[in-house]
Amino acid sequence: MDHFPIIQALCRAALAQPTPAVRKQVERLRDALTKDGETKVAGALSSLLTAADRSVELVPSRIAKSRAQFPGETLSRNTQVPVDRETAAPLADIVFPPDVSPQPPLFDDTVSRAIGSLLEEWGSLEALAEVGVEAPKTCLIYGAPGTGKTRLALWLSAQLELPVLVAKIDGLISSFLGTTARNIGNLFAFANRYRCVLLLDEFDAIAKLRDDPQEVGEIKRVVNALLQNLDSRREIGLTIGITNHPRLLDPAVWRRFEVQLEIPWPNFDVRVEIARSFMPPVTAPEAHLRLIAWFTEGATGAEIEALVRTYKKARAVRVGEPRQLLDTLRQFATLNSARIDPKRRELLFADIGVLFKAMSRDPSLGFSYEDIGNIAGKDKSTISRHISKSGEVELGTGDQ
């Protein structure tokens, strides 16, 4: 379809806030394309429908019932946050719901369903109270840097229409004896007064193992103060901790968190959707999105975003000139060597026939010789010739 990128963009915009009628029409278009043999463009619409389903599943309709049940005074943009007495550095920043992106972060189906169930519990406080149980008030989110942990915490808070009190670790930690523990107490006292979510990012900096031989006695006092304040807040408001280094956390800290959510590396399908989400206003062919996802195996969402920025810049600065995606990938791999899986990087700079063979054989890509030719700027007979001349592929080609 000559104008499918425009149709795809219209469908994506419509599905941002889907109604049953909109969804039905997109499904009809997908089914008609499938019937006509346009399987690739139909698959692109199926991906949009799947992403729309995930967004709906993450936000239960009952969540509005319990927003008012979180206690405390209302935070405003004029509310002054507590500061460190010695340095006057603020102990926290405040992020309000309108300042948070309305788009949910992208995770695999298992994590998305777990997040949806957590939101559903927070949206059903009255129903839970009737059967003598409570929704969890503490949540620890951990995983590799760049996997979307902080974005998830902010998005969850925005769904509850609660401002987020984001602790500033550099303001909390002090070189003065006893000051760090006092700052933690002041931060929690402030959070307990107001209706908000307390977000402790880089949590391991103040929740380290108390038996770490590299730490002095002060860290024990800090962790003890943290544990006491977590206990006192449990019945008052929501607390979310975030860490890239879960092994550094004291075991007693782990026990304070009712929910312990690990954010994994994004799989292939999630990487496709992450690339798609960062692409506007540029419209990229579906094959380009899939190849970007393929070459970012083992990458985080932040690293995929960086590659998409490179792709968009290449499209912008070379208007009217042919620009191959493979050239852009090689440029990114050269300037950001640590962000590309070594096996993928080796393929990218290998003999072109070896690369084409790996692309044609990978089931996740599902590329024909014609698809590879469109990406490489060659006809399919040339692609076939390159592949036939190449030796056996000995490099990894699939998600492990």
Image: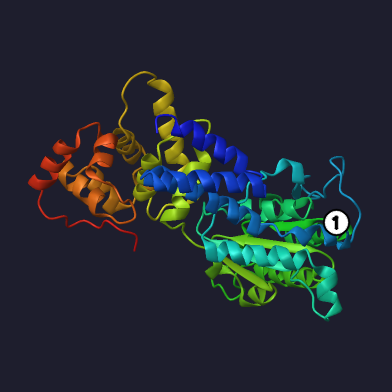
Q: In the rendered view, would you say 81 is above or below 207?
A: above
Q: How many marks?
A: 1
Task: Give coordinates of residue 280: x percent, y percent.
Answer: 52, 34
Residue 214 visible in the snapshot = no
Q: Determine whether the residue tagged by mark 1 lies in a helix, strand or loop.
A: loop
Which is more toward the observer, 266 or 225? 266
Q: Is residue 286 above or below residue 104?
A: above
Residue 18 percent across, percent down from the top left? 65, 46
Residue 379, x across and y down, in percent: 19, 33
**Furthest-bottom residue in view?**
132
Answer with left or right where residue 188 lies relative to residue 321. right
Q: Residue at x 45, y 51 (%)?
A: 271
Q: Which residue is mark 1?
A: 195
Quadrant containing the N terminus is top left
Q: Quadrant of residue 185?
A: bottom right
Give amino acid for label 1.
Arg
> Which residue of the protein is positioned furthest toward the top in this rendering?
320
Task: Kindly indicate the quadrant of the structure image that contains residue 195.
Answer: bottom right
Q: Residues within 10 Å of mark 1 (few under 14, many from 20)?
A: many
Residue 149 is situated, as x and y percent measured from the top left of the image, at: 59, 56
In depth, the one of 347 and 131 nearer the eye is 131
51 with respect to 79 (left or right)? left
Quadrant for the C terminus in the image: bottom left
Residue 282 placement, left or right of 137: left
- Judged left or right of residue 346, residue 89 is right
Q: Residue furthest right?
A: 73
Between residues 392 and 166, which one lies in front from this camera angle?
392
Q: Is residue 61 above or below residue 89?
A: below
